[in-house]
Image (cartoon, rainbow, N blue to C red):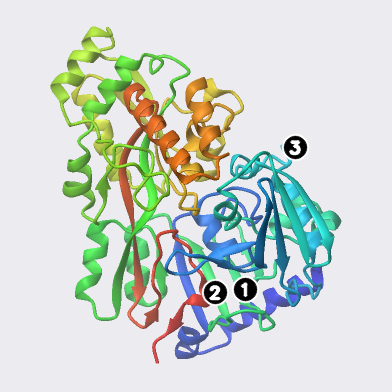
Amino acid sequence: MNRFVTGLAALALTAITATGALAQAKDTITIDLVNEPSSLDPHGQWNPDSYYVYRNIFDNMVTRDDAGEIIPQVATEWEQVSDTEVRFTLRDDIVFHDGTPLTADDVVFSVARITDPGFGSPQLGQFNKIIGAKAEDGHTVVLTTDGPYPVLLAQLVKLSIVPKHVVEEVGNDAFNLAPVGSGPYAFGEWQRGVSVTLAKNDDYWGEPGVFQTALFRAVPDGATRVADLKAGTADLVVSLDSDQARELETDPRVKPLTVLTERVAFLGLNTMKPPFDNPDLRKAMAYALDKEGITEGLLQGGETPVGELASPAHFGWVDGIEPYPYDPEKAEALIAEAGAAGTAVTFDTAPVYDQRIVQAVQQMLSDVGIDVEISLTDMSTYLGKARSPEVANRPQISFGRWSCACQDADGIMYPLLHSSSSWSRYQNPEVDALLDEARSSLDDEVRLAAYGKVHQIVKDEVAILPLYQAAALYGANAALEWTPTANESLFLNRMSWQD
């Protein structure tokens, strides 16, 4: 395996350094991310900069097409054997990058690994309804769930299949540093803090990529990402704001790309510790924030304010849950009644988030009497605090933009609201029971009714503060053919150069 990885790295570096400028533009795609991946192990951290990269290294159990429909990938077909069992037939022609065939044993291993509490995957809450995985033969697997689980397929969109023999041989840490998958691109090199290089998998069973090499770079500053794109040193850049996207409209060499996503932006509140254990103070926060001012006056990328922790792109969206109106006078009155004027709080954030929003929220809260200090850390530190084993140590307030890539409310509401989740800062037995009901019924009407009740409770208690349905804004080389999708995947083998 080491010889294989070394060879790929050499191949990738040769492709970058030994070709002319024109050839490099055709053979190599350079993508500017905000941060370097915090993990290349697909069962490790779940965040955009990691997912953008590792999703091209691995095949998943199933995937979504550009229209958002679930389609086969490792699994070619599936059958609901009973309320709690689903039988999957697997492709028999998938080969890992080290030349070893992918079999049912790898699927069983991957399921066991990501659902093992001892492994500690941040995605555990999205897969912990799976309580069993059994290989019936080399290319058939039966998954057993703890009760009916209507979200199984939607969650399996995110389950990457890893090679059992490699992980067991090298261990989790070494696998993260040099992952082996079966996807359209193979790992080449990870220059920590700088870039990750992938090389085209010429033996890929599915749609091949057109780029011989893909280079993902960490470029924290948005203006620098735009400058790279205009200079031709980057072909695709992520996480632009509306001003940066408009800047690209006047340059014929580049173009802005945008899509309204399933991602919901929210203000997280730690309801388990002072001062936000006080529901009146949380309600004051809701009245203090001008959501329309943020979306229309600041972002201007098509974002839409929402009053619930879901977007219209999710199953589980319920019409009629309106956001709190902007009413700073009412916010001030509630703060005064709570005796909380001048309360000091820490606002945790990371560079991947639009700091204009963070600063706008800081100002709005300051205007009504809350003294907000911003704590900006790298993404890994931020995520570590957000998932602190002690709920009291999780952020007092934080800005987030959550996507489960599953387009089901379970993927956002369960991890952020259920008391058992390592992401949650809220505890309500009634909400826990409703979320459990919604993820355990095969009846869509029952599920929607449960989510409707949760939406109303969350609004009444301000358990979390939904802000808006987020848009994703990218910048691209004018010659790049690519259609962004609501689940924000960067599938390299769905991109190409114009003829």
Q: Earlier in the sequence, mark 3 or mark 2?
A: 3
Alpha carbon separation for disc pair 1 and 3: 30 Å
Mark 2 → mark 1, Cα distance in angstroms: 8 Å
Q: Earlier in the sequence, mark 2 or mark 1?
A: 1
Disc 1 designates what residue? 185
Residue 46 horizontal/vertical position (percent):
56, 49
Q: Which residue is mark 2?
A: 214
Specify the label residue 118 is tagged with. Answer: 3
Closer to the camera in the image, 92 or 423:
92
Q: Tell me residue 139's x, y (percent).
A: 78, 67
Tell me the amino acid under the disc marked 2: Ala
Residue ID at (37%, 44%)? 317
Name the mark nearer the viewer: 3 or 2. 3
- Looking at the image, tell me whether mark 1 or mark 3 is earlier in sequence order: 3
Would you say the residues marked 2 and 1 are in contact, meaning their CB atoms lie under 8 Å apart? yes
Name the residue: 61% across, 55% down: 156
| Mark 2 or 1: the one toward you | 1
Residue 24 visible in the displayed image: yes
Give the amino acid type for the residue marked by disc 1 in the picture.
Tyr
Q: Residue at x 37, y 57 (%)?
A: 239
Q: Residue furthest bottom?
A: 499
